[in-house]
């Protein structure tokens, strides 16, 4: 498959994955403890976040590669932290919450494990693992957003929304109990970061072969790597 085709598929995967993940996040139940896992929609929501994250991670490497030549070390760090942070937070835990939570809630002998959230009652190791994932994922998407803004390969607004949304996801966490209809106000930052990622994925998905040109490399490196990713056409050289 041609490189352009891979970039398009990557962009499409990012759009689909982040759309699912963002919608599932803002519609997640506000209930806590046993009541949360007695809600029949919660396992569906957990699985939606799991598969949304998996689809996003399939396309994320292509999304990064498209701007890698201009994103620099900050972009690489943001990509690595975001990838592993999302894998830790969503992929490795959502299946457990979706399947184990309702089973624990169904028996009075095990309901005690759900008070305060299962992540608080499964030992200090799991609590640290879960908390670390938040730090890694916020640092990752913030770094990736800044690198995207500076690289100018994708629209700068998308990088801004990704970075600001990742920080807002933590800052707005205390708003979980604020009434806001079926949508969770505290997850607005997650939704914003998802929309920013969808915007970046859309640009990558819509790329035409004629839009590729070399990035800021030396002439020798240009001849060795003619398809370095950069979206916007080059300015004509001055005489």
Image: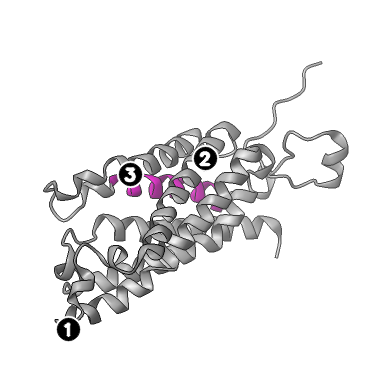
Residue at numbered disc 2: 143
Say which label, 2 or 3, has the lower sequence index.
2
Q: Is residue 233 above or below residue 58?
A: above
Q: Is residue 214 above or below residue 59?
A: above
Tell me residue 19's x, y (percent). Answer: 38, 57
* Residue 183 shown left or right of residue 239 in the figure: left
**Residue at x 29% of width, y 62% of height:** 120
Tell me residue 62's x, y (percent). Answer: 61, 55
Say which label, 1 or 2, has the lower sequence index.
1
Residue at numbered disc 1: 107
**Residue at x 86% of width, y 46% of height:** 224
**Residue 41 shows in this picture:** no
**Residue at x 63% of width, y 43% of height:** 67
Q: Nearer the viewer, residue 202 or 103?
A: 103
Residue density around tag 1, few if under 14, some if 14–19, many if 20 or more, within 10 Å: few
Tell me residue 211's x, y (percent). Answer: 66, 43
Q: Nearer the viewer, residue 151 or 35?
A: 35
Q: Secondary structure at mark 3?
A: helix
Residue density around tag 2, few if under 14, some if 14–19, many if 20 or more, within 10 Å: many
Tell me the quarter of the image containing the N terminus: bottom right
Q: Which mark is residue 170?
A: 3
- Residue 125 occupies which quadrant of the picture? bottom left
């Amino acid at each position: 498959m041609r490189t352009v085709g891979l970039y398009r598929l990557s962009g499409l995967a990012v759009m689909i994955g982040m759309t699912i993940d963002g919608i599932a996040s803002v519609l997640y139940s506000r209930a806590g403890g046993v009541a949360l896992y007695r809600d029949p929609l919660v396992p569906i929501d957990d699985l939606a976040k799991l598969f949304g994250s998996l689809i996003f991670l399939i396309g994320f490497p292509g999304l990064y590669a498209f701007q890698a030549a201009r994103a620099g070390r900050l972009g690489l760090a943001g990509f690595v932290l975001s990838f592993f942070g999302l894998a830790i937070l969503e992929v490795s835990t959502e299946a457990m919450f979706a399947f184990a939570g309702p089973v624990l809630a169904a028996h009075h002998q095990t309901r005690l494990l759900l008070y305060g959230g299962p992540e608080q009652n499964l030992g200090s190791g799991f609590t640290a693992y879960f908390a670390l994932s938040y730090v890694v994922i916020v640092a990752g998407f913030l770094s990736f957003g800044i690198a995207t803004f500076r690289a100018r390969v994708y629209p700068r607004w998308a990088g801004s929304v990704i970075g600001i949304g990742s920080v807002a996801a933590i800052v707005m966490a205390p708003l979980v109990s604020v009434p806001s209809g079926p949508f969770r106000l505290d997850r607005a930052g997650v939704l914003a970061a998802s929309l920013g990622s969808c915007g970046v994925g859309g640009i990558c998905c819509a790329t035409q072969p004629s839009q590729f040109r070399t990035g800021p490399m030396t002439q020798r490196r240009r001849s060795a790597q003619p398809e370095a990713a950069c979206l916007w056409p080059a300015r004509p050289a001055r005489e």
